[in-house]
Image (cartoon, rainbow, N blue to C red):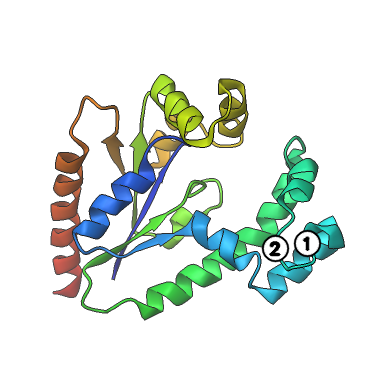
């Protein structure tokens, strides 16, 4: 089965793009959503997080103590790298399991991940897509969505590779800038992937 990775900076609209692919019948693995789930379900990961960041990493009801974790990792690259080193392998395992459960008749799948390149998970995919948007538009989207300041959005963006860096690594580019029709762009890529999938099957 052909595997497509898709990424984009915060506020780029990659999740919206993924929903268009889903309407076309393409299964999507949302790595960031899955990461939040396995951090409270995967016993091996939970033990690793508690060992690295203390028992206060989890609340008494089993939920992740986001404030505790954020206080440790937000402005400390070494601690953030430590957390990612625990979470990313667990997400990789979940992705592999998910792939095995997808209907074999599906021509290709999509893996959505904010840190597709940073985590190295693009290596598990056959090709990759970058969803790119102008900085001002991304800032506006996230400020309105999360109710935070431009400074807070910029701080989050600093934790990711820049669009220019990601574009050098991506195989395909989708412009989500409100000037180019995103559905038309998705349809072009969809047809392209269908052709490749048929070739692989043949």
Eyeballing the image, is 150 above or below 23?
A: above
Q: Are marks 1 and 2 in contact (CB under 8 Å)?
A: yes
Most foreground residue, 15 or 119: 15
Eyeballing the image, is 4 above or below 115?
A: below
Q: Which residue shows up at 26% across the image and 59% down it?
A: 22
Q: Is residue 137 left or right of residue 115?
A: left
- Which of the labelled discs sits on residue 63, or is there none? 2
Q: In this view, does 199 lie to the left or right of 16?
A: left
Eyeballing the image, is 172 above or below 133?
A: below
Q: Which residue shows up at 39% across the image and 58% down it?
A: 111
Q: Which residue shows up at 18% across the image and 40% down it?
A: 185
Give residue 188's position: percent from left, percent from top: 14, 46
Q: In this rendering, does residue 149 appear at all?
A: yes
Q: Read off the residue under disc 1.
A: 59
Report which quarter residue 2 is drawn in.
Answer: bottom left
Give residue 145's position: percent from left, percent from top: 47, 35
Eyeballing the image, is 39 above or below 99?
A: above
Give residue 78's position: percent from left, percent from top: 77, 43
Counting other residues with Cα less than 10 Å from the Cα at mark 1, is it few (<14), some (14-19), or many (20 or more)?
few
Q: Is mark 1 on a helix, strand or loop?
A: loop
Most foreground residue, 103 or 151: 151
Most foreground residue, 68 or 51: 68
């Amino acid at each position: 089965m052909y595997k497509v990775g898709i990424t984009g900076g915060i506020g780029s609209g990659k999740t919206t793009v993924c929903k268009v692919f889903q309407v076309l019948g393409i299964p999507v693995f949302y790595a960031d959503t899955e990461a939040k789930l396995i951090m409270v379900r995967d016993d091996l990961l939970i033990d690793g997080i508690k060992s690295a960041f203390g028992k206060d990493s989890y609340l008494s009801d089993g939920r992740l103590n986001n404030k505790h974790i954020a206080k440790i990792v937000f402005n400390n690259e070494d601690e953030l790298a430590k957390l990612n080193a625990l979470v990313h392998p667990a997400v990789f395992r979940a992705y592999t399991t998910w792939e095995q459960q997808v209907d074999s008749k599906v021509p290709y799948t999509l893996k959505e991940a904010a840190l597709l390149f940073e985590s190295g998970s693009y290596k598990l995919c056959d090709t990759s897509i970058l969803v790119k948007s102008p900085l001002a538009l991304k800032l506006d989207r996230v400020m309105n969505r999360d109710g935070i300041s431009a400074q807070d959005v910029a701080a989050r963006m600093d934790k990711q590779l820049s669009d220019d860096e990601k574009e050098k690594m991506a195989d395909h580019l989708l412009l989500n800038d409100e000037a180019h029709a995103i559905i038309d762009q998705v349809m072009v890529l969809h047809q392209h992937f269908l052709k490749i999938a048929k070739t692989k099957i043949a």
